[in-house]
Amino acid sequence: MMRAIVTPPVLSPAALSELKAWLGIATGTDDAELTTLLMTALELCEGFTGTMPLVATCEDTVPACGARQALSTRPVQAITGVWMLAVDGTRTTLAAGAYAIDIDADGTGTVRLRAPGDPARAVVRYTAGLAADWTALPDALRHGVIRLAAYHHRARDDAEDGKAPSAAPPAAVAALWRPWRRMRLS
């Protein structure tokens, strides 16, 4: 399964303001870098928790089979379209009766093709995310994103000295995010 983000989450100016306040920055000279750090921290939050923090539009490319297939991102808000994907990349819209969709109580979206077609793949478009905007994000997740972005901003000086920051989030960030973490048994 391959996921593509069609419409990335919108980061409100409030997020940048919170990060600048946390870092004690009053000027706008580093705004682009800080915004990039916030977006990266949101991606790392998703990777750690298994939950997309802010709503985005995604597409999963899945095998065109009759089995029930879970979408890669949670929590799914809505499944908005299903297409068959030809080898040359052209899409054919499937009629609503040609597939079954479901969103489980935990936000897992699933799709099942009722009559798999000749192309070997299908594309499913959906919106997923925990909060519609920055201010609606739960405090622990929002504060963890701010702390992680600040940690990486401060670590840039260490990177110049040849020390790379850890790939794992700092313990304070992990503690904030841990209650939101989804674990799967394989």
Image (cartoon, helix red, strand yellow):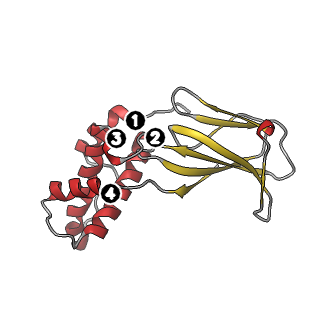
Position of residue 154 in the picture relative to residue 81 (left or right): left
Q: Could you say where residue 93 lies in the image, as x and y percent from the top left? A: 77, 51
Q: Nearer the viewer, mark 2 or mark 4?
A: 4
**Residue type at tag 1:** Arg
Q: Nearer the viewer, mark 2 or mark 3?
A: 3
Label whose residue precedes the other's in the sequence (2 or 1): 2
Helix, strand or loop status at disc 4: helix
Helix, strand or loop status at disc 1: loop
- Residue where numbered disc 3 is placed: 136
- Residue where numbered disc 2 is placed: 50
**Residue type at tag 3:** Ala
Mark identifier at residue 40: none
- Residue where numbered disc 4 is placed: 38
Q: Nearer the viewer, mark 4 or mark 1?
A: 4
In the displayed orientation, state which residue is furthest to the right.
118
Whether residues under marks 2 and 3 lie with C-beta atoms below 8 angstroms apart, the answer is no
